[in-house]
Structure formats: C-alpha cells, structure tokens
Image: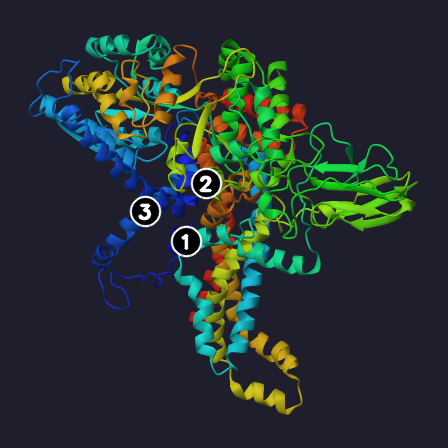
Amino acid sequence: MHSESSTFRTHRAVTTLTALLAGALVLTACSGGDDDKKKDDGGASGGATASTVTLPKLDGARLEVAAVWTGAEQANFKKVLAEFERRTGAKVTFVPAQDPIINFLGSKIAGGQPPDVALLPQPGAIKQAVDKGWAKPLGPEAGKELAENYAQGWQDIGKVGGKQYGVYYKAANKSLIWYNAKVFENAGAQEPKTWKDLLTASRAVYDSGVTPFSVAGADGWPLTDWFENVYLSQAGPEKYDQLAQHKIKWTDPSVKQALTTLAQLWGKKDYLAGGQTGALQTEFPQSVTQTFSGGDQPKSAMVYEGDFVQVNIGETKAKVGTDAKVFPFPAVGSAAPVVSGGDAAVILKDSKAAQALATFLASPDAATIQAKLGGYLSPNKNVPVSAYPNPVQQKIAKALVASGDDFRFDMSDQAPQAFGGTPGKGEWKDLQDFLKNPQDVAGAQAKLEKDAAAAYGNGS
Amino acid sequence: MASAAAAGAPPGPAAPRGRKSVTGTRRTVAALFLLPALVLLGALVVYPIGYSLVRSFYNASGDGFAGFDNYKTLFTDDGIRTALKNNVLWVVFAPTVATALGLVFAVLTERVRWGTAFKLVVFMPMAISMLAAGIIFRLVYDQDPDKGVANAVWVGVHDTFAQSSAFPKAHPGRDSPLVAQGGGFVTRTAVHAGRPVALPLVGVAPDQLPDGAAKAAAARPEPGKVTGTTWQDFTRGKGVGRLGAPDPSEVGYAGMRIEAVKDGTVVASTEASGDGTFTLPAAADGAVLRLPASNFREPYDGVDWLGPALVTPSIIGAYVWMWAGFAMVLIAAGLAGVPRELLEAARVDGATEWQVFRKVTVPLLAPVLAVVVVTLMINVLKVFDLVFIIAPGSSQDDANVLALELYRKGFAEGRPGVASAISVFLLLLVIPVMLFNIRRLRREVRR
C-alpha cells in the first residue's frame, strides 16, 4: 500500500481512521495465521536460512533505518532486521517516518541526525535526495548483490546520474484486476486476456444483474493507475517514458486514444458502482470491500488495483484465492502492461554497517524472510516463488519477475508531486473530472497538459 | 493565527516617568519578570510571523528573492481563488447561523424545565475534537442511504411519495427484439394476434425480482388476442442460455407493465403474470409493444451532499452542529445578566413575546452577540480540519479554504513561498477582527 504517493497516505490516514483501525485488527489476525505457517516450515526461515550473502562482523555497530511502514508490514520488516542483527551482531533500530518521507528526512538531516538507511517510495524522492547531497552511493558489495539478483530495469530506477543509489527492496504490482469469483461464475464470465475480452466479461456480468466495476474515484491515484496501465499497453513503453518525463505533451494523439479507450468503461454509467457520481465519492478501501461483500449480489464484480488490495480484502469475509481472485490487467495493445511501484533502500550515512545492510537487503535471503510472512512482493528474481504464502501471491510475484525489463514504474510517482501526487490537483483532479464527464476527451487532455506544463515547468 | 490572536494581550499600564513605577517596582525587576513571557512570545509567536513574512518574498527553494511573485500567485491561482470565495461563504454564513441558533436555543431553554439538560446536549458536540466530528459527518453525508443518515432520511421521505420500480437495471441483451426509447423499451416490429411475442431483458439482480416471480413460460398463441412473455433471459452460471426463448431456470418479470401503442397512443395495456406471460385484447393487433419507463425507474439515491455543489454548505452544517452549543452557552450567560424588570415592563405594556424578543432581549444582548460572532469569525477564518476530513478527494478542490490551500501548497506541492504568502494574507484578514475585539474588550474594562 505504501508505494502509493505520499499525500494519499496522509490524506487517507485521516479520512479513514476507522477503516484503518479495522484493517489493523485484521492484519494482526492475518499475521497470526502467517506465523503459524512459519512454524510449520520449521527452522527453514529461522536459524537455518541458507546464507547466500557474506556479511562482515559488525559487533557494536548501531544503525537506524527509517521507513513509513506501519502495522504488520513494520513487524515483518523488523524480523528481517533481526536476522541481520543475528548474522552481523550490529544493533538496528527501526525509525517510523511520516509522509512525505523526504520532508521527514529533511528535518532529520537539518537536525544533524539522519537515519543510516531510509526506504524511499518514489524514484523522484531518490533523485531529490541525491540532488541535495543526502544519499551516498552504494559500495561494490551491494552492487554485486544487485547485479546478481535484479533485472536491469530494477537496477536502473535506483540509479541517479549513472551511479547506483537505491536497492529496490519492495515492489508493488499495479497491473491486477481483482474479481468476485462467485459473480463471475454466476455470469458465466471468463478471466479476460485482452481489453475486448474485458468488455465482454463486463457485459456478461452486467447482464447477470451485477454492476461490473468499482472505481475509487474519490482518491485520484487509482485513476492515474488505470490510465497508466491502458497507456503503457496501448502506446508502448517508449511513449510511456516520454510522457512520464513530459517530453511529449498530454495533447498527444496517444493520450487521446488511451482516454477514449478508458471511456469505454468509465463512460457507461451502469458499468460503475454508483454511476460516475457515486464512483467519485468511493474511496479506495470501500471500492474493494464493496466488491467482496454482499454475498453473490455485491455492489460490483471487479476492482482494479495493485497487490495491496489483499489487505483490504482482509477486511471482508472473502478469502483471497477462492472468493477473491485476480487476473493481470488485460492487454489493450500488443502486450499486457506491468506497472509497478516500489520502495528503495538508500544510504544516508555512509558506514561499513550501512553498506552491509544495503547488501543484505539486496540479497534473496532478506526478501525470502519477508515473502514468507505475506503481504510483500520482491523484485528480486532469485527469491523462490514458493516462498510466497499463497497461490495468488505466487501468481503476482511470477508476473512481476517475468516482466523482466518491460515493467514501468508508476508514472504519477515519477511526476512532480504537484502534478502526480496531490489530492484535488493536477493529474488526480483532471482524471476525476474526466470520470465525471468521459465524453470530453479533448477537454481532459487540455487540462492535463496545462497542469503538467505548470508542474514540470517550475519544477518546485 | 490563534497564537497571533493571543499575542494581542491587554496592554500594560502606561510607563511612568521615574525609575520606579506606580507600584514601586524597579524597571530592571519588571523586565526580569517579563523576560520569560517575552522570550516565549518572541520565539513562538513573533519570530514565526516575522519569518513567514520574510519567507513569503522568497522562491520555492528559499534561496532566491522573488519579490511579489508569491502574492501575484495568490490572486491568480485558480485553487486560491476558490478558497477565497469559499472563505467568504464561511465567514458570512457559519458565524451568523451558529449565533442565530445559539440565540434561539438560549432564549427557549430559559423557559423549559429541562433547560439545563437540553443545554448539555446541545453543548456536547463541543467536547468532540474537530477530527472526530469530521469523521462522523463524513459518514452522515455518505451517499449510500444504508450508511449516511442524511441520505437515509431524505430517501425515506422521497420513497414514501415516489416508489421505485422492480426492474431498475433491466436492459435488452444481445440481438434483442427490443430497442430503448424514452427510458423504456419498444419492440422493433409490430405484433400480431395469434403469434406469441417474446420480450426478453437481462440485468435484474435475482434478489431484486418481485416476490411473485415464477419460472418463465412460453406464451400460447390465442386467436384474436396478442399473447407473449416478458422474462429475464439469463441463466445463472451459463450466461443467456437459449437467446430469445425462456430456459428452464429463467424467471418471468411478474408485474411488468406492457402497453400496446399505435401511432403514439396507447390502445391497450396489461401487466405480466407471475411467469411473465401476458395477454392483450385484439385491439393490440398491429401495434408495437412498449415496456414503459415506469417499469425501470432507478431507485432514488438521495442528495449528492459531498458533490461539488453542496460540499461547502454541508461542511458549514457540520461546523454549526459543533459551535451552536458554544454560542448558546455564551448567550445564555449574557441572558442571565439581562434585567428581568425590563422584560416584565414590556410585557405589562402589552408587548407580544415576539416584540419582547425583537425589541428588548436582542438589543440588550447585542454586545454578547457581537462577541460571539466575532469569536466565531476568527475561528472560521482558520477552519481547516473539517474541510480536510469531510470533503472527499474528488471535491476537495470545490470545498477548498485558505487554510487548507496553505497546507496543500506548503506541504504537498512544495511551494512554501506561496504558502507563506497565504499565511500572511490570512493574518491580514484576521487583524481587523482582532482589533475590533481588543477595542471592545478595552471599553468593557473601562466600564
């Protein structure tokens, strides 16, 4: 969940306190279950984890690691840190950070006490940290580990100016559509492979008396993710990169085509739970829960978002894998898109211990520990798929690793925050307006271009 | 801004000419005693205000002088303009409505036996934090009538007058003999007596079908009459099944209204029975059949409280809910000080209760009312939390106020220069109200 842009987190954290509270309860319940599983594995994940990485002895060294993770996620990450402590003898403290983490780090650095390592959620944040001279490049050991375990694409987004700064420890696969298995069965619908199939399946679901989609329009970021998937698949990776850097304008014909394609779903009032106006007031957690509750008459049959949807499914009675199933975002153009997010570990205070921790986080050992605990996805290609606790997770992980270098990082996370990450502004707002009035493709493009020009222009 | 208001402390006594003041304290001693307060005020109030002022003349990164650019943005940026407009709405309506309600409550509770209990209840929302109140009202205004109490009431009232229909989402399936027309559906071709008509539709949720619905049956031809079936042409788990003909597990549309239309006038009409079959008299021969729009009326889903148009009034409503109690308590205190004999005199002179209220009570309470309105105005100028929490992301722009825009510019968009300019502007807006309050306080002290 936390690879989302930062403002969403703060905003949502306040607006849906109650939901989060419930989520936390469920999470605890989940992690309880996972613990059991871990015990079943016996010593495999405990002391006897095969060591593939050599770490120096660091007795007496102290490290601070900052990340915005909370709840079960934080607890699971602490287990990874504990393994590092066990192997090296160093003492690692987890520093809970607030969003936006770059501002949090700014105040820490101004105060002269930066954490040794921080996990940054956006490529833009890494660049900012390097530009300000906060981030320190990775040493040869971490570099070697990265080269062995990561696809070139994942290494490259951790680079700034040709130097390796970030280790992508955690990834998110944002090219998934989750569906209510019961509804699909009743409607006789099949998991679609292409956009056309998706429309056919939607039609079948609609004919059976269930609204096909929940779109979380109250939050802007799910809308940007929708667009990114369609655009990446339809216009291809090169155009995607150009648009992400604003080298082509939003008035480009490729954008028009993608928006027109989106309008095939967004433009049908009966295809969206609550119609367009209802969708604009549906927040992300609700969009998930209303798809997986209500027996065989839920408010909608499908909901689009990344692997973190599982956390919200946990709030319902539905079981991931049986009641709630998933298929990759269908191919709109020639190939199915893989849009991803992720958190990268960056060293802020160079030391032997910090380098060792970065090396450890780049190794399959660290990722495997957290993979077993669930709710986590690693871009590390040497993490065995069997490490993931359930078939759904395995499917998602496989899709992510299989995409190799063809995945693309979330476009709105790459954009300046004023454009890609502010509630009620920029791309979020413009796509919300587009959802309100999907006929006006040209108007939406013009607004997107105007906001993008302003945000990329002054760069601050 | 609140601290800024606090900074306007009552002035000390006029400085004496000699080394000692009237009370005989040495200046150095006085300074010594004042020092802690001055340091605190300086560090926590004066310095931040001063720095904000300076910062507002610098660019986003803080290292280049920007002149009045940030202030120019202040009056050209669309977001800030909406915020300004909304702030005006807030300042005009929130304090007046809250004060008016408080006045009514205060005057009325004076006369009821359970007044104190009532006052307690009205005052209770003050004990809730803004954040909690925001979350409560986010739910109150929820679009879904099953969750939002505002829409539950509204929909309840609406539905007692206008019933929704049984087949809201019904629509023609593939290759249907029906076409949409004016909210309903009509057959593509004219129907004839003795030839059963099929009127298949899809898309009604099984649990929404009317209670009388039974398995659909194919209609038998009857000479001299138009017969047919209207049913849900959808088999669970199999899709449409046989297209255009009732399958064994498909269900009839019990109670569906069917009209036979010739040249725009209805010549015959009927309702389908439990298994979806219907019979029309010979008059319908050669007409087209119409399933009128009344069959498909969508359930009313209430008012779009948090939509762009109503979001600001809705949030002001939440604010009034919180602060009417505050106004009531202050006014009730003022009311206790109003000399009873004046009211009695007016009554003896034959004034009606309304006249007593209008001509005696309100004028006597005017100073208190002014305090309440002004206090609320200051409070409203810096409103942030309610707007931030209640407005969903999609209408946050429409609900925007200056304090929220300050936060967004400063912390989400990384433009601290513009944010500082907004804060300075807000300070300027508060100052006149503050001065008014201070002057009034002074007059009060002198009295």
Residue that badge 1 annotates? B132
**In the rendered image of this protein, does residue B243 appear above or below residue B97?**
above
Q: CA distance from mark 3 to mark 2?
A: 45 Å
In the rendered structure, find residue A289 and report the number of the disc placed on it: 2
Amino acid marked by disc 3: Leu
Residue A277 percent location from the top left of the image: 61, 40
On the same chain, marks 3 and 2? The answer is: no
One can see residue A36 in this view: yes
Asked whether disc 3 touches disc 2, contact meaning CB atoms under 8 Å apart, the reply is no
Mark 2 is on which residue type? Thr
| Closest to the observer, B275 or A360 | B275
Give the Cα separation between the discs numbered 1 and 3: 28 Å
Q: Residue at x 89, y 40 (%)?
A: B287
Residue at image point 54% right, 71% down: B103
**Residue A439: quadrant of the picture:** top right
Q: How is the image coloured?
A: rainbow
The residue located at (63%, 46%) in the rendering is: B309
Instruction: Name the spot of residue A175 as percent of width and height, x first.
Output: 46, 22
Above or below, comparing residue B405 to residue A306 in the picture: below
Q: Which mark is residue B44?
A: 3
Would residue B342 appear left or right of A60 to someone viewing this image?
right
